[in-house]
Image (cartoon, rainbow, N blue to C red):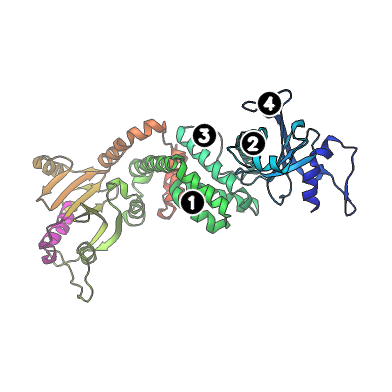
Amino acid sequence: MKGELTGRLAMYLSKYPMAKVWWCGALLDPSEVIQHQHEEALQLSSGAEGTGPVLRIVEWKTKPPRRELLVCDAVGVHRITLRAGIQAPDFDFTAYVLWDKFAGLTDHDMLEGEFEQSDSLLGRTVEAARARLRSYFRERERDRAKELIEKWVEEGVYPYAGEPAVPVDVAEREAFDSVAVLVSRHLQGSKQARRTQMVLLREALRRQPHAMPKVLDELFGLTGAQKERLEDLVERTPLANLVAANAQAVDRIDFLAMLRSLLFEPQSRTAMREVDQLHPMLEKELWVFGDEYASAVSEVGLTEALERALGRRAGVPRQQVRRADGRGGRLDLMLSAVSGAGQTKRHLVVELKRPSVTLGEKELAQVRSYAFTVSKDERYGHDNETRWDFWLIGNAIDDVVRWMIESHGEGGGLIQNDGRIRIRVVTWGELLDSCEEQLTKQQERLNYASSQARSTQYAERAHADADVVRLLTAHDDSA
């Protein structure tokens, strides 16, 4: 009750500091509860003669019982109470309209003023006050965001360093700042805890902007108004989608730079291993082989691969699949895609060889044996909708295999194609060049170029399990 009464009399007590009011033995002091004040002349569209009304906005340190627009006379004596009528989340305020013309307001005037279509002087004044309140709090949101970000930078918890260098960085920070300010009251704990929360927030924005409202609600228990604002932020503007799309492009550029360095730098090419480095990295970067591939498995046996491709039937015993020489086999990577409304299935089998291996007849024979086994399997023989691609990938191709490719004449490393099964031999250089060419337009638009530091940071963030950071940093040490 004391706070409410202080709000009612704040303008009068501020204007006449000699006046003293006590409530239950306590002196009412506006300065104890006022966080921020703003005052300006209120512009009316028409009908105001002489000195016009003044709009005073007071932001409180403590939350008032309700947000109100108090109509007062020129000296600040409150006459009637109206609802604030605006959305300003996270701001606790009372607005005052002061004008000598309101010294003798009646209940009838108050009712008139509550109707937006009212053409009375009070109605127009209230409408103008609410319009200015909306623009004022948009400005205050920007000011508060700037103040909060400066504070976070000083504390060392802000997840960005320096100024954004390229347009994608600018767009990402704008979106991050909007979301971080919205949930700022929930970012609590030690410096390290708040830093971690902000890093997680940044990554959620980069990867899954549309999932952010749900994720942040689970983390922080947002209010209904906060969830609504966050959902509106994601849906109303393409910025979050732009950030996600741009972040994906930047990640791909950094990955290609990282992989090229690992495959071709002398310090790493001899140390790279297929199973525990190339395989786990490429399982997370299926786009290298084509965006149509939605799933992949690594180190899968031929039996498991065919059952996955053709669909394992419940109750049907597993039929072991063997190559022509009676041996089994393990596929490095098998990627799968479905196209044509689910009618045509595509599978890509990738055989990876470490950079130090030159692709020759021996390596090609291994891939051909896998392709032959699939083509002759009786279960696959009746499936006319499934297409299989087999790729053999390495740093270099010997003269014999290169002659086979040239003799086939279709290009793209193709050496066999019967309509259902195709076999290609591809170098890493050719594959990476093709991927970079597809990213050229996005890279030019973003004005982004990867670097050793950026690609190493991406390796630390996305491929720590593949233990490649030490290989990348070895390049720096030897430079």
* Alpha carbons under labels 3 and 4: distance apart: 48 Å
**Residue type (three-letter) at the residue carrying disc 4:** Ala
Mark 3 or mark 1: whose residue is earlier in sequence: 3
At numbered mark 3, what does the secondary structure look like: helix, strand or loop?
loop
For label 1, the residue is: 212
The amino acid sitting under disc 3 is Pro
Q: Which residue is mark 2?
A: 123
**Could you give the CA–CA distance between mark 3 and mark 2, rounded to whole angstroms?**
47 Å
Q: Are marks 4 and 1 in contact (CB under 8 Å)?
A: no
Membership of 368 in magenta stretch: yes
Specify the quadrant of the image occupied by residue 472.
top left
364 or 413: nearer the eye?
413
Name the residue that disc number 4 marks: 48
92 on left or right of 391: right
Residue 15 image offset from top left, x and y in percent = 83, 35
* Place of residue 413 in the rendered image (x, y in percent of width and height, measured from the top left): 17, 43
Give the spatial CA distance, label 3 vs label 1. 23 Å
Q: Nearer the viewer, mark 2 or mark 1?
A: 2
What numbered label is drawn on residue 300?
none
Q: Residue 474, can we see it?
A: no
Which comes sooner in the sequence, label 3 or label 4? 4
Q: Residue placed at 64% from the left, 53% from the top?
A: 188
Residue farthest to the top, as pictured: 50
Badge 4: few (under 14), some or many (20 or more) residues near its Cα, within 10 Å? some
Left or right: residue 281 versus residue 139 is: left
Quadrant housing residue 52: top right
Q: Which residues are magenta?
A: 364-386
- The residue pinned by badge 3 equals 164
